[in-house]
Image (cartoon, helix red, strand yellow):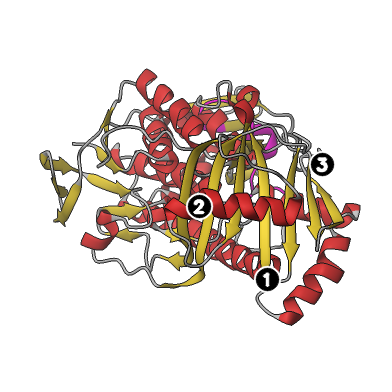
Amino acid sequence: MGVVVVGAGPTGLAVACALRAQGVPVRVVDGAAGPATTSRALGLQPRGGEVLGRLGALGDLPQRSVGIGRVVIHVGGRRAGELRVGQPTKLVRQPGLLVSQAEVEARLRARLGELGVRVEWGTQVTGVGQDGDGVVLSTSAGRVDAEWVVGCDGAHSAVRKTAGIGFPGVPLVEGFVLGDLRVELPLPSDAVGVWVRGKEMFSAFPLPDGVWRFMAPAPGVAVEDVPAFLAAAADRHAGLQIGADDEWVWTSVFRIHRRLAETYRQGRVLLAGDAAHIHSPFGGQGMNTGLGDAENLAWRLALVVSGRAGHGLLDGYETERRPVAADVLDSTTGLTGLVLGESAAARVVRDRVLFPLIGLAPVRKLIWEQASQLKTSYARSPFGRRPRVGDRVAEFARHPGFQWTLAAPTGNACASVARDLLDDVREVHREGQEVLLVRPDGHLAWRGKAEPDALRRALTAMLDR
């Protein structure tokens, strides 16, 4: 029966690609009639691009994206600061990509098709039932049986609701509007513009094909009034004139929430992406956090489905990924409150402290590396020799291919142990007498002397065998 993934957004498609790369039978169902064409999320951070690269789904996205080198901030109509982004550091070697979520999904669908799977559109999930042996989905297309179900069906997840998993949280911003507009503007094409004035904010993002995205908080504005509201905001804040004949490609009205699922697993039902956590779009972390969930869950689930690991291996998914989501919720909530100036004190800090500071090189580096998500580590202790178990191992994380990597002295017997317990293992020569075993998601699973028995004991414990 394999795995059924519910939801064909970036997270669901990435889960399916990673599982298929490990040889797991997969079905992907989605209640929509077909693929979304609107841009929605825009930011593919360096970690997100790395995940797509490992899955063989990055393709030409770097060439199709807009290169953003800076965020230019204005307060009260005057330039107040500039945050340079995308600059190489010791940690971050590749820039982030400003590219439509629709483009990311298209690349993932193409890769999934190469792996022999097509999305089953128009299949709405209405119920989830399970026992010790499997899961039964009630859908608009009939009954669907599976060994495991992964709910990647967004903030209003039917899988989460019917599985009885709580989703506590609070609204952060009651009304927010955005619009994608095809127009020529007298703004630099390599910069995001942000204008703040008291409690008001307006921002403009350059997109491919001559499109610009406008965003602003706007409580009480109806979707049909978004073009007029954003045109007025563009004029008031940035002096931009929008004509009546300019083409609005897409508009949307939404509320910003912060919510975190009480658990990521209920028996044979698992959650990932927006079905497990939602937060403010400030900082461009949403799509990337979901992609991180996808690869972390997929390698574990692949081992369980193949019979190489016990169900206990899946407990590590929530243990590692839920704290990451909680940190993202906290950071994006704080950033939202600061940028929108929710109080007089926040506006003073924002205008007189935060914005002037972001031009400083140490601050810029800190912000950029944190936003990249490449600092994510699952190490249990801050102490120990690097890389620690749980750390991202950069030299192998950038390798294409979603598979285990064993770095060991040539001819060492640890390789046969790894293949015996894990099956698909890439071998890399490493000088010295120490062995590194790196997970498919680029994080260190084990390090130790080149002693096969020690590796076997460690893997047997990890795999819950």
The kind of residue tagged 3 is Thr
Q: Tag 1: Cα neighbours inside 10 Å, few (<14), some, or many (≥20)?
A: few
Q: Quadrant of the N terminus?
A: top left
Q: Residue at x 80, y 57 (%)?
A: 74
Residue designated by label 2: 226
Is 117 magenta? The answer is: no
Is 79 positioned to the left or the right of 3 in the image?
A: right
The amino acid at mark 2 is Val
**Which residue does the numbered mark 3 point to in the structure image?**
89
Q: Is residue 236 left or right of residue 21?
A: right
Q: Is residue 396 magenta?
A: yes
**Disc assigned to residue 199:** 1
Q: CA distance from mark 2 to mark 3?
A: 39 Å
- The answer to whether one can see residue 442 in this image is no
Q: Nearer the viewer, residue 435 or 358?
A: 358
Residue 222 percent coordinates (x, y): 43, 59
- Of helix, strand and loop, which mostly describes the magenta segment? loop
Extent of the magenta region: 386-405
> x, y percentage for residue 336?
63, 65
Residue 37 in the image: state x and y as whole percent: 42, 33
Tell me if residue 228 comes above or below residue 119 in the rendering: below
Residue 181 badge: none
